[in-house]
Image (cartoon, rainbow, N blue to C red):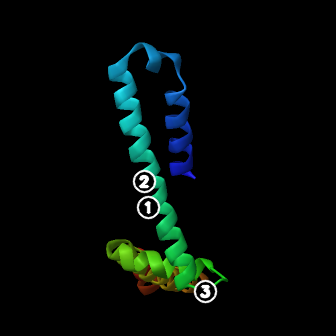
């Protein structure tokens, strides 16, 4: 969607009357238009590739798996986030368990760790 917007902006700039008056501006806008069209084409190829790789269903997780091979650091960040979330839930359940117990010395010490 972003590259489609950029292509639209570049084509709108080409129709600007300033392009007829300033050859240097026209040259810059034409270079920008070419770059945006190439970017859009590249993005569309990637989307088509992911769609074909994951079958016609194109599930969200299937698409994510395609991106995770392109962006391995992102995949690692997601795994770390999932692990941290599991750790948080585990520790939260421990805290709830201790909060339900009597308020004795050892329980209070564990609660404030």
Say which residue appears at 56% left-offset and 49% top-offset: 4
Packing grade of label 3 (10 A; few <14, some 14-19, many >=20) is few
Of the image marks 3 and 2, the number of the one nearer the N terminus: 2
Query: What residue did someone put label 3 on?
Result: 55
Query: What residue did someone put label 1 on?
Result: 42
Say which residue appears at 44% left-offset and 46% top-offset: 36
Residue 80 sits above or below residue 6 on the image: below
Q: Nearer the viewer, mark 1 or mark 3?
A: 1
Query: What residue did someone put label 2 on?
Result: 39
- Percent of width and height locating residue 85: 48, 78
Q: Quadrant of residue 8?
A: top right
Classify residue 42 as left or right of residue 100.
Answer: left
Residue 3 sits above or below residue 42 on the image: above
Query: How many angstroms separate mark 1 from mark 3 (CA)?
Result: 20 Å
Q: Secondary structure at mark 3?
A: loop
Report the residue that reaches farthest toward the top: 21
- Percent of width and height locating residue 65: 48, 82
Residue 88 sits above or below residue 40 on the image: below
Task: Out of 10 and 63, give the one closest to the viewer.
Answer: 10
Say which residue appears at 50% left-offset and 28% top-offset: 13
Q: Secondary structure at mark 2?
A: helix
Q: Secondary structure at mark 1?
A: helix
């Amino acid at each position: 969607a972003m590259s489609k917007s950029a292509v639209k902006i570049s084509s709108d700039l080409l129709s600007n009357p300033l392009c007829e008056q300033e050859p240097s501006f026209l040259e810059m806008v034409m270079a920008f238009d070419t770059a945006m069209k190439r970017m859009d084409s590249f993005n569309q190829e990637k989307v088509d590739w992911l769609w074909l790789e994951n079958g016609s269903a194109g599930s969200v997780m299937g698409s994510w798996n395609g991106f995770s091979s392109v962006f391995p650091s992102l995949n690692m960040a997601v795994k770390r986030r999932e692990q941290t979330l599991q750790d948080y839930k585990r520790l939260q359940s421990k805290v709830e368990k201790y909060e339900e117990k009597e308020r004795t010395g050892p329980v209070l010490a564990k609660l404030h760790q």
